[in-house]
Image (cartoon, grey):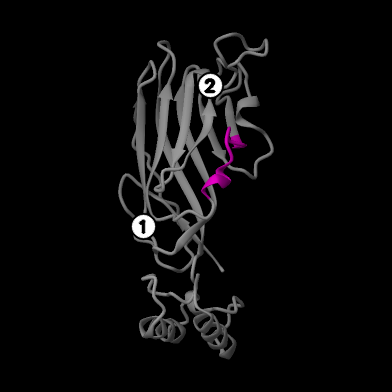
Amino acid sequence: MNHFRSIAAVGMCMIATTAVATDFCTNQTTPIPDNASVISIPLIFVGQANELVDTINIDLLMSHDWVGDLVIQLRSPSGTTITLLDRPGIPSAGFPGPFGCGGRDLDCTFTDQALTPAESICSTTAVPVITGEVIPSMPMSAFIGEPASGLWHLLVSDESSYDSGTVHEVCLSITTNIACLPDLNADGVLDFFDISAFLTAFSNQDPIADFSDDGIYDFFDVSAFLSAFTSGCP
């Protein structure tokens, strides 16, 4: 049973255990200083303690005169850090030259499901130069299985003393799995309170009570919950 969540940036979004379709993004402009100073953009995910990352992607909208200057990373609440973009065009393979890709701006989604590596893209005429779905420098699957709840950070640095830019918008989307499905109050203990929570959810036809995952609230959901409850959790 997957639960779809969105991220609230530079603030908090209380997220229920049912599937939601609304995205929460930061659209506060943040300047990117020259010469290797790192900016950190906080993204706070507020969810259940037993929600683990299943899939993840990030949308970025940035203006920058020379994307070959940029290093972009994402850090999870557990401290895992991956590189999304690492100075495209460096080291040089002949084109576009020794200083990396001189194209402008990014309007893209970093996702493991993309077909084109972000660092393989360069143009001196296309604006934005990196656009659409792109593969990050390091796989985002590194976050799978980690707790989703907590403070995430987007880290951006400009590794050159020339040109500058701005982060305009960041959207981080995560699909989670529940580590222990019958632990409905996410306290790490299976007890009466989880049974009570299930009965309340079942009565209200809350999707968390749809243990057979068929959109119908019936005996099979009760049976599936009791089976999972009896089996316990890791």
In the rendering, which numbered label is found on residue 138? none
Residue 98 lies, with reference to residue 77, above or below; the image says: above
**Residue at image point 48% right, 26% down:** 71
Residue 47 lies, with reference to residue 73, above or below; the image says: below
- State the SS at label 1: loop
Residue 230 lies, with reference to residue 53, above or below; the image says: below
Instruction: Name the residue tied to disc 2.
Output: 87
In the picture, residue 34 is in which quadrant? top left
Residue 140 pos. (x, y %): 55, 43
**Residue at image point 39% right, 19% down:** 36
Please name whichever residue, 180 or 131, is drawn nearer the observer in this view of the structure: 180
Is residue 165 toward the left or the right of residue 104 in the image?
left
* 179 magenta-colored: no
Q: Which residues are magenta?
A: 132-143
Residue 66 pos. (x, y %): 50, 17
* 134 magenta-colored: yes
Instruction: Name the residue tied to disc 1.
Output: 46
Residue 179 pos. (x, y %): 49, 66
Q: Residue furthest bottom?
A: 219
**Quarter of the image containing the N terminus?**
bottom right
**Residue at image point 39% right, 70% down:** 186
Please name whichever residue, 136 or 27, is drawn nearer the observer in this view of the structure: 136
Three-letter amino acid code at the position of disc 1 = Val
Is residue 189 toward the left or the right of residue 234 in the image?
left
Which badge, 1 or 2, comes first in the chain's sequence? 1
Residues under numbered marks 1 and 2 in contact, where contact means CB atoms less than 8 Å apart = no
Please name whichever residue, 86 or 166, is drawn nearer the observer in this view of the structure: 86
